[in-house]
Image: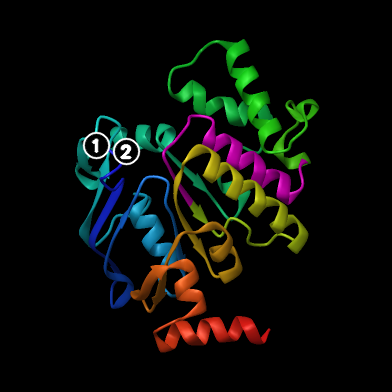
Amino acid sequence: MKDEPLLRVTSLSKSYGSRVGCNEVSFELWPGEVLAVVGESGSGKTTLLNCVSTRLPPSSGTVSYRMRDDAWRDLYRMSEAERRFLMRTDWGFVHQNSADGLRMTVSAGANVGERLMAIGDRHYGRIREAATDWLERVEIAEDRVDDQPRAFSGGMRQRLQIARNLVTSPRLIFMDEPTGGLDVSVQARLLDLLRGLVSELGLAAIVVTHDLAVARLLSHRMMVMKDGVVVETGLTDRVLDDPRQPYTQLLVSSILQV
């Protein structure tokens, strides 16, 4: 049902003792929509991403997801096994450090194929064909299918991580600083690839980034966080071209001055 959100976050909070990671954050994410969460280091954006993606349990609040049968499920009322299956099939997670999202000691083809095996595919030829197809889609040559990720450049590892995540046709992708640590030219190539795949596949995505240029290129809507609180939200171009809040104005002006 396209007239309903895919994800609904309500009053989500996470604290570490007296330190607030995120506080009373609420939003909805729609099918095919890309939401950027931006802010300085320590603003709470990664804490929020980890809570929404069930990698970190919140202190309070709810995260609800609309399953493929259109039934809404409270993610933190699901069993651990149910959440793991969801993360292997309907979700993807692209880490800033590609080593966190890849198995570095198995081949590129095996990294992609493992996701298919996790959902029950046991046909070696079909798995290898799908893996090779996805490597080509992320601009990794077919003759590298048996190479291990440790033999790849940083940009290639990120592209491999993307292929591994997308092979199961997920509906929602989480991205944590997906271009962080890459050279500018490599970043540009990766961003073009991501933007094309997100559009082609109709993916919903939540992208955490401190880079406003990345947010502008990838996202439809933006949330700006400071000290664990969302201080401004709106369409990406509106927020960047006409920021309303002093903190957002400061963020945008600091980029323009560089």
**Whole-percent x and y of residue 81?**
31, 33
Residue 9 numbered mark, or none: none
Pointer 2 residue: 83
Snapshot quadrant of residue 85: top left
Colouring scheme applied when the structure was drawn: rainbow
Q: Secondary structure at mark 1?
A: loop
Query: Closest to the observer: 235 or 69?
Result: 235
Quadrant, the C terminus: bottom right
Task: Specify whether residue 215 is painted magenta.
Answer: no
Q: Which of the 4 image quarters holds residue 72? A: top left
Q: Which residues are magenta?
A: 152-174
Whether residue 132 sits left or right of residue 32 in the image: it is right
Q: Would residue 157 be counted in the magenta stretch?
A: yes
Give the x, y percent position of residue 18: 28, 78
Q: Is residue 88 left or right of residue 188?
A: left
Residue at (46, 25) in percent of width and height: 118
Numbered disc total? 2
The answer to whether one can see residue 235 in this image is yes
Horizontal placement of 60 versus 38: left or right?
Answer: left
Tell whether label 2 touches label 1 (CB within 8 Å).
yes
* Residue 61 on image: x %, y %: 20, 60
What residue is pinned by disc 1?
79
Residue type highlighted by circle 1: Ser
Looking at the image, is 200 positioned above or below residue 232? above
